[in-house]
Image (cartoon, coloured by chain):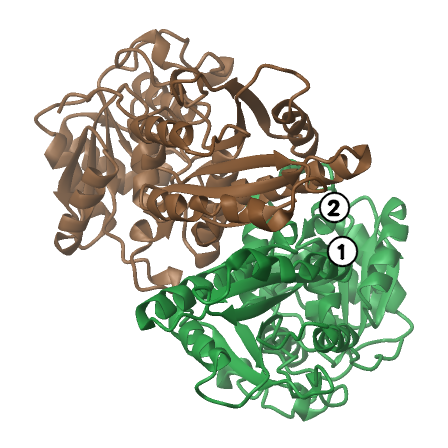
Chain colours: A brown, B green
Amino acid sequence: MEPGPCSRPAEPGICVSGSPGAGSAFPASLPSGAGAEPGSRPGTVAAVLPAGGCGERMGVRTPKQFCRVLERPLISYTLQALERVCWIKDIVVAVTAENMEAMRSIIQRYGHKRISLAEAGATRHRSIFNGLKALAEDQPDVVIIHDAVRPFVEEDILLRVVTAAKEHGCSDYDFEFGTECLQLALKYSHTKAKLVEGPPDLWKVTYKRDLHAAESVIKEKISQEICVVMNTKDEESAGHLLKEVLKKELNCVNVTSTVLDHTGGNVQKFPTDQCYSFICVNVVSSDFQEIQKFLSTLEESGLPLLYPVVVVLVHCCDLTLAPLAPKMESLMWIRSLAEDMKKRNVLLSGLLLNYSKDEQKLQESFQQGASIIAALVKERSSALAGQLLLA
Amino acid sequence: MEPGPCSRPAEPGICVSGSPGAGSAFPASLPSGAGAEPGSRPGTVAAVLPAGGCGERMGVRTPKQFCRVLERPLISYTLQALERVCWIKDIVVAVTAENMEAMRSIIQRYGHKRISLAEAGATRHRSIFNGLKALAEDQPDVVIIHDAVRPFVEEDILLRVVTAAKEHGCSDYDFEFGTECLQLALKYSHTKAKLVEGPPDLWKVTYKRDLHAAESVIKEKISQEICVVMNTKDEESAGHLLKEVLKKELNCVNVTSTVLDHTGGNVQKFPTDQCYSFICVNVVSSDFQEIQKFLSTLEESGLPLLYPVVVVLVHCCDLTLAPLAPKMESLMWIRSLAEDMKKRNVLLSGLLLNYSKDEQKLQESFQQGASIIAALVKERSSALAGQLLLA
């Protein structure tokens, strides 16, 4: 079970480059109190995820680890959080026999790597036991036991867990708070194990409201960066103006920009690692070859695999000069293109901005446009893909 | 501090009709294990809300009780939850001196009744003490101490609390879990008091993710009913067809319908108690007098005071017969009307449905229309008000 190549884009704020265990895999911002210096090797680490629960407190039929958040099962987010940490060599998920096939297809569909499956037992501890048995041959130095329904686990806390486990072995603390899990680990896997209480960010999805919260947190996370794509470097252009308005309106969001070259979308230049929202200003020519090239490059980048990507095609024109109706009709091709892109997890919509000569009207229009863009980026509603909006 | 008339519409699932303390104020669905039979009188009950916290765990500057959820401060939801229980005679909110004025304007703006203010102290207990002092003259039988940041409190649990307090006085349980609050209440207000651990629904908004969850829970709550407003009883009409499609698409939502009379919106017939979403199908005539009448009646009903009300004006026409562009242009008046209504907390948008003679196209269009309506109802995004959407 060797780690596969990091074929998907990295996560917001997390560095996955570098070989497993190498110093570059640790974020530069690792807190000094983390217990390990950047560059230290955490040794052979594996993880076991007990995921055999039936989610009875959730009040829904689907076990909570399989409930969908932004159309993707919750457990896929947890796997993503663990597998992006390159020094975790193996990840074993313990699922019930009836969910084994569903779990396999989740792994395949979302391209998860370094995952193997074990059969869950009747209890959480039995599931952990089965997971540890699956790891017995590899004899990892440390095994992290992680709830399948805690998707927001960060590399630094995992590193702290591993370092503490290696330094202290099995402390009194462990025996007090996690006796049973720990004894299982000690007895059957010939490895040290430690059960650690996590920080508030590690919260467990238990009730239905937690699913809502998880969706909001994920939406917020992937909406932290917006890239304005334009066809000119001219700082007086509509694209630059919109970028400035967006910066003001969304003061917590990082608004970047890129100029599209004439061969289409040169996504190499895009901040693809963290950016799931693209605002293309006046890029579209009437034969829309450029935008199709851009969308193809976006798709090839793998970005829409894990999260819905929002693309807003902004068209600026002075509506006092050109009548509105034919303008809107001329942009109706966006509808059919959007229908097609929706299947590929790209939410495409059009925005017609009134580029008036009247300074105040211009400002109003751009302000409203920025609010609309903010809503499209924040909500990522697939039902509204393909609409032509007006500001 | 007499209870005012229940001038605002009732809450989803909660009955506020009947005089204070009367049997009819209890929901018919009161659980049999609630500890009190429907019709039993809970006696003189008051509530104290300590709201002097600074919300440091929230990671935002605004104290959490004043953070906005759907544009309304969280504490207003908590007040609403308490004041809709007619047998709670007085509600005292303890806020810091610097927030006193803000709190007064919240009470005024959202029409809260039976509320008085006390100054919060340096600690939660000091705030409760001050709240109880404010009640000392009234000598209520029972005082409920309720966190300002637990907005989802239901009448049945409040009734259980009060009944338990009256039956058991101050049990060992109280002394174990709530000694200080309780002693304060006993010492200074000459009244029995009990601190009760609530059910999971009573969860406290503590972290930022809880605000997200609260917003989602509230959005879901107010989106449980959709009213389709039509201009004909004809069961073959577009309105009836859309209603049926909505019922299928949104199987958890109660879809009702009403026929608009020719004098405009006869809101008396609307399920205004629980409905914050109106889908008006082909109601709009070209001079839009009818829709203006409807909107006025809606506003007069007080519905938009507490929650944003979604109104979608659906226009059905066969787009193979009529060209799209002039049709869209003819509906552009919706934009300016929406701009005006947004100030009144009504989110108005237009939806053009392709009423094709081709059965399959018709179905597709209505399905897409239903998805768009579901998104508008669910998200309640003010940025998208005024848009003309197409299905």
Residue type, mark 2 in image: Gly
- The chain to which mark 1 is attached is B
- Could you tell me which quadrant the C terminus of chain A lies in? top right
Residue type, mark 1 in image: Pro
Q: Is residue B7 left or right of residue B286?
A: right
Q: Secondary structure at mark 1?
A: strand
Q: Which mark is residue A73?
A: none
- The chain to which mark 2 is attached is B
Please give the name of the residue rendered at 88% of the width and 58% of the height, measured from the top-left corner.
B104
Q: Which residue is mark 1?
A: B50
Give me the C-alpha separation between circle 2 and circle 1.
8 Å
Q: Is residue B356 left or right of residue B166?
A: left
- Structural crowding at the residue carrying mark 1, measured as other residues with C-alpha within 10 Å and reported as few (<14), some (14–19) or many (≥20): many
Please give the name of the residue rendered at 60% of the width and 41% of the height, measured from the top-left corner.
A352
From the top left corner, tell me how far across and down residue A201 is, in percent. Answer: 48, 37
Residue B218 appearing in the image: no
Q: Which residue is mark 2?
A: B53
Give whichever of A129, A307 is nearer the camera.
Answer: A307
From the top left corner, tell me how far across and down residue A349 is, in percent. Answer: 49, 43
Is there CB contact under 8 Å for labels 2 and 1? Answer: yes
Q: Secondary structure at mark 2?
A: loop
From the top left corner, tell me how far across and down residue B31 is, in percent. Answer: 51, 83
Check chain identity for marks 2 and 1: say if they share one.
yes
From the top left corner, tell me how far across and down residue A302 is, in percent. Answer: 31, 29
- Structural crowding at the residue carrying mark 2, measured as other residues with C-alpha within 10 Å and reported as few (<14), some (14–19) or many (≥20): many
Give whichever of B104, A267 is nearer the camera.
Answer: A267
Q: Is residue A9 above or below residue B101?
A: above
